[in-house]
Image (cartoon, coloured by chain):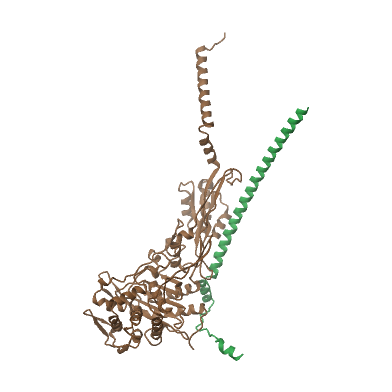
Amino acid sequence: MHTFLVVSAAIAFVFLVAMLYLAETTTVATRGYEAQRLVQQRDELRRQNSLLEVESARLDAPARIDAEAKKIGLVRVATIPVVQLEPITAKR
Amino acid sequence: MTETVSPRRLRAIFALFACATLLLTLRVGYWQTLGRGELLESATDQVRSDLVLAAQRGVIRDRSGALLATTVPLRSLYAIPKRIGDHEARASASAKLAPLLGTTSDAVLAALESGAEWLYLRRRLPEDTSRAIESLAIPGLGFESEPKRLYPNDTIGAHVLGFVNDDGLGQYGIEGKYDPVLRGIPGRLVVERDPRDRDLAVGLRTARAPLDGADLDLTIDLVIQTSVERWLREAMQKEKATSGTAIVLDPRDGAVLALASYPTYDPAAVARSDPQALMDRAVSWTYEPGSTMKAFTIAAAIDQHVVTPNTTYDDKGYAIIGGRRLSNALGKAYGISTVTQILEHSANAGAVFVGQRLGAEQLRSYLLGFGFGAPTAIDVSAEATGDVRPLAEWYPVDLGTISFGQGIAVTPIQLAAAYAAIANGGTLYRPYVVATRRDADGEHRTAPVAVRRPITAETAATLRTMLTSTVDNGIANGASIPRFSVAGKTGTAQIPSDDGRYLDDAYVSSFAGFVPANDPRFVVVLVLERPESRLLGTVTAMNAFRGIALDALRTARVQPDRP
C-alpha cells in the first residue's frame, strides 16, 4: 500500500511538473505573440509619427509659406524700421 | 486440394524482406547518428527565418532644427495574380487600381497578366494612396514596407543634401560624403516561426540589434537657403543663364549658411532629373573669375607694401605686358587714378599695374595662400581643385591677365572662402556644412578650422574699406543696401573655348561681397554663366546679392550700422 502511494505521488508529481512546464511554455508563447504585436504597433506608430513630422516640415517650409502668402496678396516689406535702443534708454 | 508455395519462393520473399528491413534499419540508423545534424538542419530550416534588420538612416536638420531629410518606411504594393482570380476579376481590380496608381487600367492588367507569380505593382506609395488601395480589399494584393528617403522642402537645398539611390546609398552632397555615418550598421534576427509566420518566443532565437545611423545638424539656415534659391532662380530666369550658383558663408568661422546651384533637381525623384542638374556648381565647377580677383591682387600688393590705397598711376585705358595690350572694359581710360579707384572702376590696366609692382612669384604665392588651386576641404562630395598654374608655365602676359582674374580657374566656394578671409580680418577658414553629428556615443560638434592667415589684419581692414568704397562710390553701387555698409566687387569674365581662345559673346557674371562691411556677418558669392545681357549680367548679379544679403540680415536680426 505504501509503495502504491509513493508511486502514485511520484506519477502525480511528474504529471504536475509536466503540466506546469506546458502551461509555462504556452504562456511564454502567448506573451511572445503579444510582444510581437506590440512591437508591430510601436513600429507603426513610429512610422506614423515620422510621416506626421515630414508633413509638419512640409507645412513649415519657408518656400510653401512664401507661395501661400503671395496667393493671398501679401507682399514682401521693403524696409523694416529699426528702433535704436540707446536714445530710448537715455530718456528714462 | 491445397496450393503450396514452393520453399524456394518463400526464401526469396524472406530474403527480400530481410534486405528491405536491413536497408531501412541502416537508413534509420544513419539519420539517427551520422545524418542527425543534417536532418535537424532541414527540419529547422522550414520554421527558421534569418532576417536582416535594417538600420535607420540618420536624419538631417538645419541649424535651427528644421527637418531637411529623413527616412520613413513606405508601403509597396505587390500582387499575386493567381489569387486575384480569373481574367474578369483581374480586369475589375485593374480598373479600380488604375486611377489610384495614376496609370491606365490596361497597364495594370498587362502587369497582372504578364505571367509572373508575384510582382510589385508600385513601390513606396504615398500613405493616402496605400490606405485607399487597402480599403478596396482586393484579394491577391498585399503591402510590404520599404524605406524611402523624404525631403520635405522638395528641391530646396538639393545640392547640399545630395540624395539616396534605390540601393540605399548616399550620392552627392552630404548624403554622399557622410554616407557611412548616416547609413548605420544593419542587425540580424534568427528566429523560429509558426505556421502563421509569427515569431516564436520559445526555441531558437539569436538577435543583433541594428546600429542606427548618426543624425546630422547642418550649418545651413533653411530660411536663408530658401531666399538664396529664390533670388538665384529669378536671376537665372531673367538672364536665361545656362547655370548659376550662390553661396552664403559666415566669415567668422567658415560655416556655410546657404549653398545653391542651378539647374537643380528633386532629390526624391532623381530618376526624372537631367543628369547635368546633379552637378553642384558651387564646389564642382571651375571658371575664370574675372574682376572679383582684383581684390586679392591688391590685397597681396598692400600686404607686401608695394602699393597703398592712395598710390597713383596713369590709366590710359590699357596696359602693355609681355608684348600684349590688355584693355579696360570698353577701352575706357580713367587718367590719374588711385589703387582704390582700380577697384571702383574695375580697371584692368590698374590691376596689371599692381600685378607688375607685386611680381608673378608673389602674386602666385598669395593666390595659393588665399586657397586657390587647392580644394577647400568642404565636407560635401566632388569638390574641384581649380587651377593656379605653376610659375614655369606662366607667359609674361599671364602676370597681367591673372591680376584681373583671367587665366586662372577657381570654384565659387574657393572665392567665397577667400572673401571671408578679407572679411574676418585675414584668416582663411575651411568652409563646412555639418555642425553636429549625433550618434550612440553622444554629440560631436565640428570645430571651425583656421587654415592659415594669407594677409595681416591691417591689410584685411584696408581691403574692407576699399571694397566698401567700391560699392558706395564705384562700379558695384547696385549692391548697396540702405542703412547697411556693404563691401564687394563685380566680376565679368570671358569664357575660354576649346581652342584656347576666348569666346566673343559669352561671359560669366558674378558678384562677391559681404555685409555689414564694418562687422561682417555674411559673405555672399553669386555667379551666373552666360547671362543673356552679357556685360550687364553683373547688374542682375548685384540685384540678387542685395536681395540675398537683405534677407539674411533680416533673418539674423542684424541692426543697421549706418544712419
Residue B359 x/y as whole percent: 28, 79
Question: Within the image, what quadrant is residue B407 found in?
Answer: bottom left
Colour applied to chain A: green
Q: Is residue B283 left or right of residue B53?
A: left
- Residue B488 or residue B166, whichever sits in front: B488
Residue A57 figure quarter: bottom right
Looking at the image, the residue that sits furthest to the bottom is A91
Using the rendered image of the protein, determine whether residue B517 is visible from the camera's viewpoint.
Answer: yes
| Image height of B220 relative to B168, above or below | below
Residue nearer the viewer, B281 or B120: B281
* In the image, farthest residue toward the top: B1
* Residue B411 horizontal/vertical position (percent): 36, 71
**Residue at 54% in and 76% down:** A72
Identify the residue shown where x is 26% and y is 84%: B318
Task: Specify the farthest residue to the right.
Answer: A1
Image height of B471 relative to B79, above or below: below
Tell me the colour chain B is drawn in: brown
The number of numbered badges drawn on the structure is 0
Q: Is residue B236 visible?
A: no
The quarter of the rendered structure image containing the N terminus of chain B is top right
The residue under the point 57% across, 9% down is B2
Front-most of B549 and B464?
Answer: B464
| B6 to B275, vertically: above or below | above
Determine the residue located farthest toward the left in the rendered image.
B323
Counting from the top left corner in percent of width and height, residue B530 is at 34, 74
- Picture coordinates of residue B109, whole percent (x, y): 48, 51
Describe residue B252's horizontal placement relative to residue B350 as left or right: right
Locate residue B320 relative to residue B67 in the image: left or right: left
